[in-house]
Amino acid sequence: MNRQAQAVVLLLVGGAVLRSSLTDLYLRYVKQGLRPFLIAAGVLLVLAAVVTLRYEFRGGRGQDGHDHEHGPRAGWLLLLPVFALLLVAPPALGSYAANRTGTALTRVSDFPPLPAGDPARIGVLDYASRAVFDAGRSLGDRKVRLTGFVVKGADGAPYLARMVLSCCAADARPVKVGLAGDVPADLEPDTWLAVTGRYTRRSVADDVNGETIPYLDVVDLERVAAPTEEYES
Amino acid sequence: MAAGDSAQPAVRGGLRGRVGSVEVLAAVLVLVVVFRAPLSRLLSTPGSQTWTTVFVSVLTQAIPFLVFGVVLSAVIAVFVPASFFARALPRHPALAVPVASAAGVVLPGCECGSVPIAGALVRRGVTPAAALAFLLSAPAINPIVLTATAVAFPGRPMMVVARGLASLITACAMGWLWLALGRSEWIRLPHRPELDGMSRWAAFWAAVRHDVMHAGGYLVLGAMAAATINVFVPQRWLRALGHDPALGVLTLAVLAVVLSVCSEADAFVAASLRDFSLTAKLAFLVVGPMIDLKLFAMQAGTFGRRFATRFAPATFGLAVVVAVTVGAVLR
């Protein structure tokens, strides 16, 4: 690949990174904290491309017979993520990935009081941790409202799930909560729901890894749009 | 339709001499845009969609670190005089190894950045043993990674100590092993356009461009492998392997290689693998930042294939042995 082609590839990679980090697209793949670094990296890549093209068109080195300098062949591969980002822009991980991995809770021992409000809005991970490791003590009889997407278990029963990220979607792990009570039977996987309910002692073992999946006694359930940030952390 | 015309000779291949890469690039871009609809359909099954998401995620996460590492290595190549490293490191290679390993503390980032930096150090005349020790230790013992480990293993500060210690020991041992057995002809740094004779800034940008294209290309290769393993190896298999202690250690060590999770996140992944012993998790944390699929691809690209096929298995074996030993001592 000669220098002009390399510059174009750099421009495309930088442009793809900038496009995903200046919009909310990047939130499908990484955490919010990475945004300034993504923007900086995108700007640097575009700058490298522009500087290369400027040197080329000023003819500084292009005319001295080294025009067929063999750039790295591996560089062609950089086109793949550009196509994936600009043309396909795959969605955030959903029920397919959540079904293949067992629910993942990290043991915590410190449970601050629930936030104010009725119902209290908390994360799926927060609810599951309080239910499993605190036996629901810090939940008490309060109504809580969780937002997540539908996952169908092997038995066809619906679960509410949320993917948890610590870095990027490659390390995403699902957290699942069973839905007890009056739940419509026609919930399609990947439908986003806001579920209001109370703690129940019922739980089940995840058939993938044997971890505990707590249940929520559903009082109210509504379909909602997917949030901008589909992952919890 | 200039791009369409040039696509035909490019495909035939025999005329490559006359068809430049710009024409090939234009043809590829046109083809992808034309066939966008069928390509998107192909990628819309849940499995391939998940694959694409993981592939893009690994790259999105790695690109800032890659660019940061490449810029730093270009600074080393262009603005830091070789005499600096001669003064900063002990003259004797055997002493330079532990100093370089400990210097890994100051590079906050993950492993994608450290490969081009180590390459730049070797080019700058740093003894390969010291540069390699730095390459192995930097992603594992920097403050960000150790903090993440502490957060992922609450109430187990020994996990952080064990990780730092085992990584440092492995990095030093690999450096010394290189001094004892390594041959310099195994390392073949890729041909890079000659930087001498250019103005400093021209040389800087030329180094950045070359390294991003090169290391970035290999990173893409590694991300593809990692996404494939991530999506197609079901977690159910792991559960059965976790209950045997020796098999558990080996399983997680291999898993660290194939999953290629960034070193800032691997502690959280390890903590979520509940079926495995703490020693097995330690092996996962020590092996992962030193050798995984994307690192192997990048090492092969930066130092040559003959180097990587020897260095990677040695690193893997040594990291497992050290992790198990440290795990047993600190239990």
Image (tube, rainbow, N blue to C red):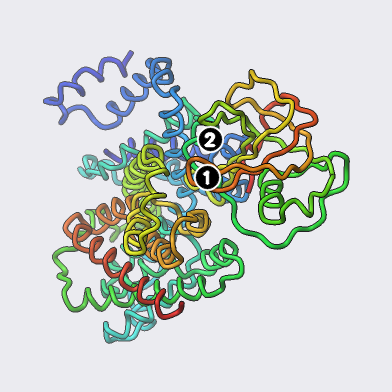
Question: Amino acid type of disc 2?
Answer: Leu
Residue B71 located left or right of residue B16: right
Tag 2 near tag 1, CB within 8 Å: yes
Q: Position of residue B234 (x, y in %)?
A: 39, 40
- Within 10 Å of disc 1 (Cα), the crowding (few <14, some 14-19, many 20+) is many
Whole-number angstrom distance, CA of label 2 to CA of label 1: 8 Å
Disc 1 marks a residue whose amino acid type is Ala
Looking at the rendered structure, which numbered label has been put on residue A205?
Answer: none
**How far across and down, in percent of the image, does residue B275 sit?**
46, 55
Q: Can residue B79 be seen at all in this image of the molecule?
A: yes
- Residue A93, labelled with which disc? 2
Residue at point 28% right, 61% down? B196
Compared across the picture, whether B273 is left or right of B217 comes to right
In the displayed structure, A172 sits above or below B295; it is above
Instruction: Tell which residue pokes out farthest to the front in this image.
Output: A202
**Image vertical order of residue A208 relative to residue A133, above or below:** above
Q: Determine which residue is flagged by label 1.
A: A172
Label 1 SS: loop
Q: Is residue A129 left or right of residue B40?
A: right
Vertical relation: B224 (above or below) B206 = above
